[in-house]
Amino acid sequence: MNIGALEEHYKLELLPLYEGDEAKALFRLAAEQVLALSSGKLMIQKDEEISFVNLQKLLSILNDLQIGKPIQHILEEAHFYGLVFKVNENVLIPRPETEELVEWMISVCSSQLPVGEYKILDIGTGSGCIPITLKKHLPNADVSTLDISGKAIAVAKQNASQISVEINFMEADILTYQSKEKFDMIVSNPPYIRDLEKMEMHDNVLQHEPHLALFVSDENPLIFYKAIADFALSNLKPNGQLFFEINEYLGKETVDMLSDKGFTNIELRKDMQGKDRMVRAEV
Ligand SMILES: C[S@@+](CC[C@H](N)C(=O)[O-])C[C@H]1O[C@@H](n2cnc3c(N)ncnc32)[C@H](O)[C@@H]1O
């Protein structure tokens, strides 16, 4: 079978789950890794025959896609802000909206923070996409990160080493964590999806991504935001800044909570899809 025929086969077989363009994009990601070809080469070499071994690999990936496994878990990698991160079932797959949060932080750090060293803490490490990307782009920053999941930290440590950045990792529960360290910036993309929102979610997220990373109760959906805000009040330096990725439905509640706790200059931003998604606040 040649590349073009297998792409068509992917499109047909994935039709119940993915639209034509999505299926093509999935094929490209799979073929780029298995055939070690750039997407440009894949487009122009559609007549090239695929070896038996590679065909078996690509058909096995197709099988995994058909049972709803996310492509990033199948290929064990995800792209984030121009970097490649190892991912598995223990970490959230990095999302484009989180790239927007990181972009915001990098622009604030570049324009507002001193040229010398400054300290950043990320809460809820996951794959390490936030702290590792920040460190890569802000080499003067002293970056720390914590997660309650030792398995997530193990993945993030591998990513830090692969991307050649130094990060301080801590295994800790932010609901009880205390420290005397002071930071210039604290950032978090904590769990924020309420149980009531599970209905809106795709099966491949519900079945394959860690629930520890995603869900909060309907009764106390801001539990992590409140705990992190309290931590920030005692652990941010004067004029220090707090950045959150937030639940699109809870923008006002998050802003009100921060304002009630005494944060100032609170700014709520939308993501590229026009949804309330990020907040910045100062102490
Ligand atoms: C939404 S994920 C974000 C992961 C990563 N920062 C990203 O943006 O892709 C939330 C992370 O918070 C971690 N987490 C959940 N409960 C926690 C707790 N009580 N203390 C610290 N981390 C926690 C999860 O293990 C998960 O890695």
Image: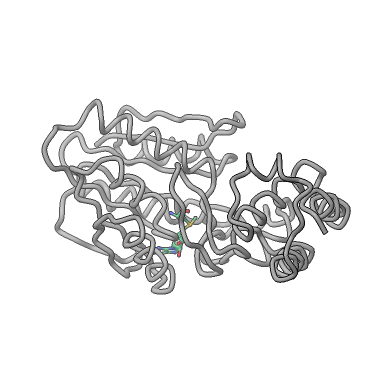
**Spot occupied by residue 237 in the image (x, y as percentages of width and height):** 16, 42
User: What residue appears at the point 13 percent right and 42 percent down from the top-left corner?
Assistant: 117
Instruction: Tell me: residue 83, above or below residue 170.
Output: above
Q: Is residue 227 left or right of residue 112?
A: right
Q: Quadrant of residue 137?
A: top left
Ligand 1 quadrant assignment = bottom left
Q: Is residue 176 above or below residue 241?
A: below
Left or right, residue 256 beside residue 160 = right
Depth check: give the residue in front, 199 or 57: 57
Residue located at (77% from left, 68% from top): 63
Which residue sits furthest left?
Answer: 116
Percent of width and height locating residue 265: 32, 27
Q: How is the image coloured?
A: one colour
Question: Residue 10 at what x, y percent from top left?
Answer: 81, 55
Most foreground residue, 223 or 244: 244
- Give left or right: position of 14 versus 138: right
For the N terminus, the image quarter is bottom right
All told, the count of numbered labels is: 0
Residue drawn at x 30%, y 46% as measured from the top left? 136
Q: Position of residue 263 (x, y in %)?
A: 30, 36
